[in-house]
Image (tube, coloured by chain):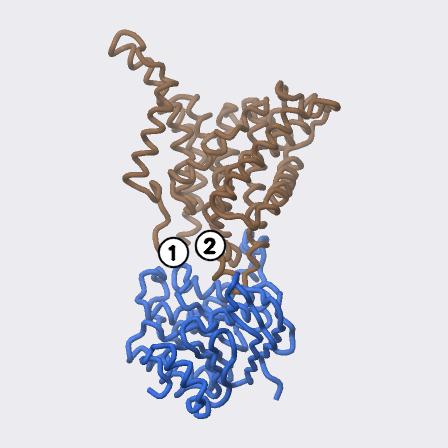
Amino acid sequence: MRPLLSATGVSKRFGGVQALDAVDLSISPGHIHGLIGPNGAGKTSLFNVLTGLYHADTGTVQIDGRITSGVPPHEIVAAGLSRTFQNIRLFASLSVLDNVLVGAHQSGRSGVLGALLGSRAARAEQDALRERCAALLDRVGVGAHALRTASELSYGDQRRVEIARALAATPKLLALDEPAAGMNPSETDALRELLQSLRDDGLTLLLIEHDVKLVMGLCDRVTVLDFGRCIADGTPDTVRRDPRVIEAYLGSGEPHTEPAA
Amino acid sequence: MPKRWQLVAVVVGLLALPWLVDAGLGVAWVRIVGFAALYAMLALGLNIVVGYAGLLDLGYIAFFAVGAYLYALTGSPQFGLHWPLWATLPLAALLAGGAGALLGAPTLRLRGDYLAIVTLGFGEIIRIFLNNLNTPVNVTNGPQGINQIDALSLGGFSLAQPFQLGGLTVPPAYLVCYLFTGLALLVALASLRLEDSRIGRAWQAIREDPLAAAACGIDVKRYKLLAFALGASFGGVAGALFAGVQGFVSPESFSLTESIMVLCMIVLGGMGHVWGVALGALILTALPEALRALGPLQKSLLGQVWVDPSDLRMLVFGLALIGMMLLRPHGLWPRSAQ
């Protein structure tokens, strides 16, 4: 089957640091694909290249057959890839529902005239989007907070709103940058269920995560980065036993992220 | 039904406004209310750029100037043109909007302080341009400005003449007040509709976090340009009306101080909040006029005028702004959380 996203030979250098060194990544449709690696391995850099926030020095990225390396972020959303951020980036002073409505920006067509004249089409579109976004908030479990200001919500709830906002763009591939960071165990369990249900609905997910237990339990396939290079790629079981992976994690001096945990 | 009654109440209120103001404060204040409405239009235009999209524009008065000069050049003996208002107003909106997009385009990569400095420069360029466009071909009359500008007129009725309605005589100041408050209300309505639309939300997302906005699929450059253009077009309409009611324009009416004054209206009232911005415009237009009364007051209490009221005006104005920053940093009437 043709991969939904494929990156080949992606390199990115920041000054003297080779953040990404000829990284290949291939994500099959319908999979939850994990991206792990010690701190500073280049996971977020790769994420930012895939979502258009950085331009790769070399290499190409294709999403659903369309070359997306070098195009601006909004065109990557149009190609079907939505993302969340590691350090939550909600629109703090907007309501929760408005945050999700911004996510649905490309689903709308109405322009300046429609807004100024309050045309029937523009209002109908707005009502329909509002309904869809409210349903998304219900789905991620924060429907009750729809009209509150985003910054008032708890950390865990803000992460859910970010997921709803990314879903509002009706992506084919949802990329989540450490969605479980800062969550307590029960919140992490709820997140696991949500991600599984999204996959069951046919969505493909790319997951950067430090919580190795979550990644190993959830992912169909895992790619491991270390020092900007791809050191392993395969099912969770093969990756877990890969000596290079074990060395990368033990060498990093972070026992809590050891894959054998 | 309550919505229809609201509309009736607003219309009756607007019709009664100049009569009430005249009865209470005198006809000079009817003019002031008209000007407050004009400045409210101007401030609401800048509010799109600064309040919604979060782009600090210090050269906004340039678009007011574009509208004013368009009206002046197409409705005065300067070129012998006397175009009607229904043609001038849309043209002013279009031309100023075009100027807004033109000046916005090179600034799209700039943020914060850098954007403020560049827009400040653009504002000055337009003023200096108007100041010097009297040679080799005299277009703007240079520093002398353009006078004998046609008074505002609607469908053959000049707003500079009293209007006879049955046995009732409506003075010219009232007519101008009606036109300006009516249009200001339309501009406020347009702002509110934009705010709660796909476009307004895109602007607010860019204001809050441009990177996250781009990751949500918003073409950030395009929407910044749109904010510059739409905001400028509101300013252009206000400028045309300004020329029509003043009868005279010159480059010195469009200095940096004016840009900052309009920005103060927004900051004082409540950035991003339509009614707050309108309140800010009203206060900053009315305050200097109200302070004129300090001259006669000193005379009656102290026997002579010790401090010139026009000096006091800036002092009181400065103190008011400092006090506001300390007590209500989000403006007098900020946008409350939904």
Residue B57 image position (x, y, % from top left): 51, 41
Residue A220 image position (x, y, % from top left): 47, 88
Residue B39 image position (x, y, % from top left): 48, 34
> Would you name the residue on which mark 2 appears?
B204
What amino acid is at disc 1?
Ser
Chain B drawn colour: brown
What amino acid is at disc 2?
Gln
Q: Is residue B213 above or below residue B330?
A: below
Q: Tell me, for residue A93, which label it has, or none.
A: 1
Q: Are marks 1 and 2 in contact (CB under 8 Å)?
A: yes
Q: CA distance from mark 1 to mark 2?
A: 9 Å
Label 2: few (<14), some (14–19) or many (≥20) C-alpha neighbours in 10 Å: many
Q: Quadrant of the N terminus of chain A?
A: bottom right
Determine the secondary structure under disc 1.
loop
Q: Is residue A251 above or below residue B315?
A: below
Given the image, what chain letter belongs to the residue carrying mark 2? Answer: B
Given the image, what chain letter belongs to the residue carrying mark 1? Answer: A
Residue B277 visible in rendering: yes
Chain A drawn colour: blue
Label 1: few (<14), some (14–19) or many (≥20) C-alpha neighbours in 10 Å: some
